[in-house]
Amino acid sequence: MASAPEFDFIDRHFLPLAGPGALFLSDDAAVMTPPPGRELVLAADAVVSGVHFLPDDPADTVGEKLLGVNLSDLAAMGAMPLGYLLTVSAPASLGDHWFAGFAAGLKHAQERFGLSLLGGDTTGTPGPLCLSLTILGHVAPGRALRRNGARPGDAIWVTGTIGDAALGLMCLQNGLPDPTGFLVDRYRRPQPRLGLVLDGIASAAIDVSDGLVQDLGHLCRRSGVAAEIAAERVPASPAARAAGTDLLERRLTGGDDYELLLAVPPDREEALLAESVRAGIAVTRIGVFRSGPPDVTLRDASGAPLRFARGGWSHF
Amino acid sequence: MASAPEFDFIDRHFLPLAGPGALFLSDDAAVMTPPPGRELVLAADAVVSGVHFLPDDPADTVGEKLLGVNLSDLAAMGAMPLGYLLTVSAPASLGDHWFAGFAAGLKHAQERFGLSLLGGDTTGTPGPLCLSLTILGHVAPGRALRRNGARPGDAIWVTGTIGDAALGLMCLQNGLPDPTGFLVDRYRRPQPRLGLVLDGIASAAIDVSDGLVQDLGHLCRRSGVAAEIAAERVPASPAARAAGTDLLERRLTGGDDYELLLAVPPDREEALLAESVRAGIAVTRIGVFRSGPPDVTLRDASGAPLRFARGGWSHF
């Protein structure tokens, strides 16, 4: 659907992101040879200004986050990235400068994770900026990590630290102090955990996008198991600890972590720890799956159940 | 990014559209085995309410058109459809009834053309409905039709009739009469020309989405050739002829035809006509490519050059 000014715009900002199969972004479609003997893994996410990011978030962080959250979907499936397609529906008020920053953020993420732009579309909208990204990855046949493989007795592990992004949003919106800028950075530039090789280690995985409790609930529902977590074991960053202990609920139910939540059978925990060291990505055991209805139980340090005011759709 | 009400919404409207690799739309990503020995063909288009379709267009036609315009991109590349991913950013005012109609339109198109939904995302927006669709198809290696293959001496052919959709939009917006409803239907429900097998016949192809003159200009620019067309040979439907002869410019520069524009070497024209009969899709020879700068020249019945007030970026 490209018209002449649109061609110039695409050449200026997006052509430098394009890989060989993109055909210079000037044909009706891209062409790509999938790696022989591999399965494709495909995900799509849409983000809207004012809903998924703040209108004054720096443009490069919007690009980096958009690609990052889709890369996180691949990480949760144990897949390696291949390429992506992008559609941009932008208000006329958004100038060239913004798109130069946006493309720089995409470029940063794609160079780090080894993928390129395959194609897309650019349109106008009278509404807020609306971005949609479809990502392609690949995995050995039958080896994609799923949400439905957790079994009673498997341990619950998470990568990195939980709740930083939710606190980062509080810093931006509610004036929570963030002296080092760490929390805001975690909100704006999530780091997909693609480095961990989880094949043969995890029995199920999901990425934490809606909040730890909600996403653990999704995994329980798909696997038909219950989950118990020890709230004080959920890893907190130094910045999150400094922000205050009264923020536990926010940390465990806020979104945008883009860490991985894993189910790991007891005899695979040593392998997970070795892989964590190899990849340089910290992992922490926070609980266990049990048989029972797909509920999430949080316990405090004394073992007593904790109740939160909000927790998504899950029961407690 | 799905929360609980979103799961119900997805199960109700989109799960019936999903194929096996979609994993019930409940994992982080879809998994698909590409056909062995084939290349993937990928395209993405975004449409916005009030920009690409009218806010009161029936919901099923919005779904059918969204999938149709993406299928048309595959047709222009000579590819066969495999599946699609869809992101929906919708205002809260858009109710369940609308989405039931939208899904019915998608279902109609996907059943006709043999593909299914692989995945996607649903979000809210304070702005107008914004839809993005990524389509996957496949083609024999190295056989994708491109825009850059037209050579001087190749004839210019189009499928179907040109300008109906642009007149259909005039019926909806400016009160142009449409006694049979044919023109409006052509605007709302474009028919992708996937039935024609063009491998070994066409040297280049593009689908007519921006308007015949503009898209022919794109093809000239990519192929490095000039084009001459005989305006009176551009096929008009009976409804378009009945609407008036003063609408020639609108028909030839309006968009949304989603017919194919082909470059065909002289010794392949017999094969094209035979394929047209086999597929039941009419084709018409409207001009010829010549050597020279990438311009489009329109001629009237006397052979004199025609000039239009608007013609996209092309020179005349």
Image (tube, coloured by chain):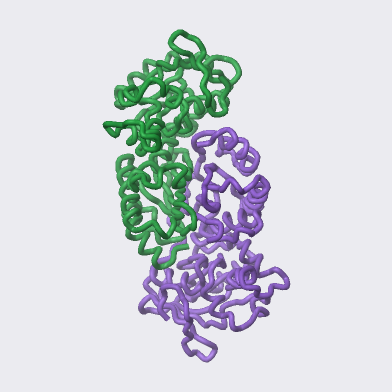
Chain colours: A green, B purple
Quadrant occupied by the C terminus of chain B: bottom left
Toward the top, the furthest residue is A302
Q: Is residue B143 visible from the viewing direction of this image? A: no
Q: Residue at x 44, y 63 (%)?
A: A2
In the image, residue A119 lies at what x, y percent? 42, 54
In the image, residue B216 lies at what x, y percent? 46, 72
Q: Residue at x 40, y 78 (%)?
A: B315
Q: Nearer the viewer, residue A57 or B252?
A: A57
The quadrant in which residue A279 appears is: top left
Q: Is residue A207 visible from the viewing direction of this image? A: yes
In the image, residue A129 lies at what x, y percent? 44, 52
Q: Residue at x 48, y 41 (%)?
A: A43
Q: Is residue A68 above or below residue B228?
A: above
Left or right relative to A51: residue A181 = left
In the image, residue B35 lies at what x, y percent? 51, 45
Left or right relative to A237: residue B41 = right
Toward the left, the furthest residue is A180
The quadrant in which residue B5 appears is: top right
Q: Is residue A234 above or below residue B188?
A: above
Toward the right, the furthest residue is B180
Left or right relative to B76: residue A197 = left
Left or right relative to B259: residue A193 = left
